[in-house]
Amino acid sequence: MITLQKASRLLRWDWGLSATLLRALATDTLTISQQTKVERPYAPLPSTLGLPQGARVSLPRAKYGGRHTVAMLTGDGVSPEMMEHVKSVYYTLGVPVEFDEVAIDNNSNEEVVREAIMAVRRNGVALKGSLKTIPGMKSHNLMIRNELELFAYVQRCYSFPGVITRHKDVDIVVIRENSEGEYSQLEHESVPGVVESMKIITRNKSAKIAHFAFNYALQHGRKKVTAVHKANIMKLSDGLFLQTCEDVSKLYPTIQFDSIIVDNCCMQLVRRPQQFDVMLLPNLYGNIVGALCAGLVGGAGLATGINLGEEYAIFEAAIRKQAQSLKGQNVANPVAMLLASADLLDHLGLYEKSRILRNAIVDAVSTKNVRTPDIGGTYTTRDVVNAINSSVVSQMQE
């Protein structure tokens, strides 16, 4: 269960908003107006993480006149629309952030991808939209991750307050090795009709992600790390990953360690997800299991993820779904991208702003039931954003 005690370690309150901003917001059409105090029946949403020891991700380099600059990689499908909603909510919050925006999508050439990478290097941190990879083309996602050495992907999946799903009290952290495995892009056609694809697993990178996972568990009061593998079949590659995780686990005696075969893992997640705490996976399994976990707690519209390296951090919606069919329809769920932007605020050290935003999301979605169709509602994207902005203003007037 998500408790107030668990969330309060990372979240604080912030107060105050200019009269000019309040007047500007009052022109919106939904409910930005004078309000009574909102009773909140739910504990604040947790942030995805405070960076664990060993990650060594520095705070963003770019900060001028008390304002942070953050790269914004707009993405495909509905992602550019979601970025505009983030700007709207940040404006309401009075967040001291300027975006260094790069218009990148699946049609962008390598020069634009390089520009995006340079923007992340320049600012140290980014908010990223989904980028579609078309069969036969180079993956922009992989290019960005590899160039910036983003070795870890962290995705926290928890039961969202008030959203009814099959399972309750789910709170799972999926930690995925982000740089090798089947994503090494080493494949070739040996003879016509026969393709070989190489899966690369190294002891160094397996140990690095394992240390990261155990440090995360220590930092966040987690009790167990579960390594997910297929070592019964891939005895050398997954066998090396599993053995390395076991070796690293011995350095963390206060954290319970176990392992599970990936197919059984998927079945157990569907049957009883509460048995899992921190899940440690190689690249491909992490992608699949992360999507499954997101589905358990409400789907792509609620899940966030963070790509982490030793120098850079990129925040995004966890399920890289472009939702091309929803583009321009005003029905896509903005919550995942707004939660990613709250994680970004935590990373910038703006904990009070983050807390207000998370509470506003709960007020809108769970208390007022302003929801998009994917989670059982009938409201538009703009309705949800307006309700969140309204709650932000209300909190700042309390």
Image: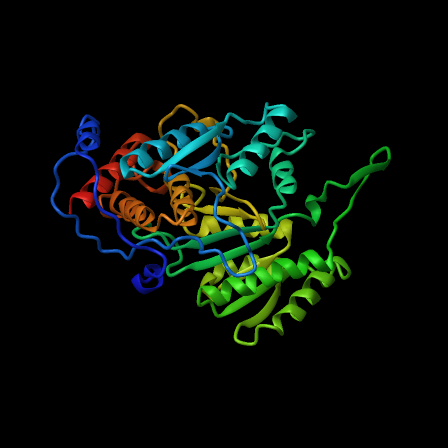
Residue ranking furthest to the right: 191
> Which quarter of the figure has residue 357?
top left
Vertical comparison of 371 with 229: above or below: above
Could one spot residue 344 in this view of the protein? Answer: yes
Q: Is residue 124 left or right of residue 162?
A: right
> Which quarter of the figure has residue 87?
top left
> Which quarter of the figure has residue 44?
bottom left
The quarter in which the N terminus is drawn is bottom left
Q: Is residue 251 left or right of residue 35?
A: right
Q: Is residue 203 left or right of residue 189?
A: left
**Could you say where residue 287 lies in the image, as x and y percent from the top left?**
58, 48
Describe the colour scheme in one phrase: rainbow
Residue ranking furthest to the bottom: 253
What count of labels does the image hold? 0
Q: Which one is in front, 293 or 310?
A: 310
Q: Which one is in front, 226 or 215?
A: 215
**Could you say where residue 77 lies in the image, as x and y percent from the top left?**
48, 28
Vertical comparison of 96 with 296: above or below: above
Q: Is residue 85 left or right of residue 181?
A: left
Q: Residue at x 31, y 64 (%)?
A: 5
**Could you say where residue 368 lies in the image, as x and y percent from the top left?**
22, 44
Q: Residue at x 35, y 61 (%)?
A: 9
Vertical comparison of 11 with 223: above or below: above
**Could you say where residue 62 lies in the image, as x and y percent from the top left?**
47, 39
Vertical comparison of 323 with 181: above or below: above
Q: Which one is in front, 51 or 264?
A: 51
Could one spot residue 276 in this view of the protein? Answer: no
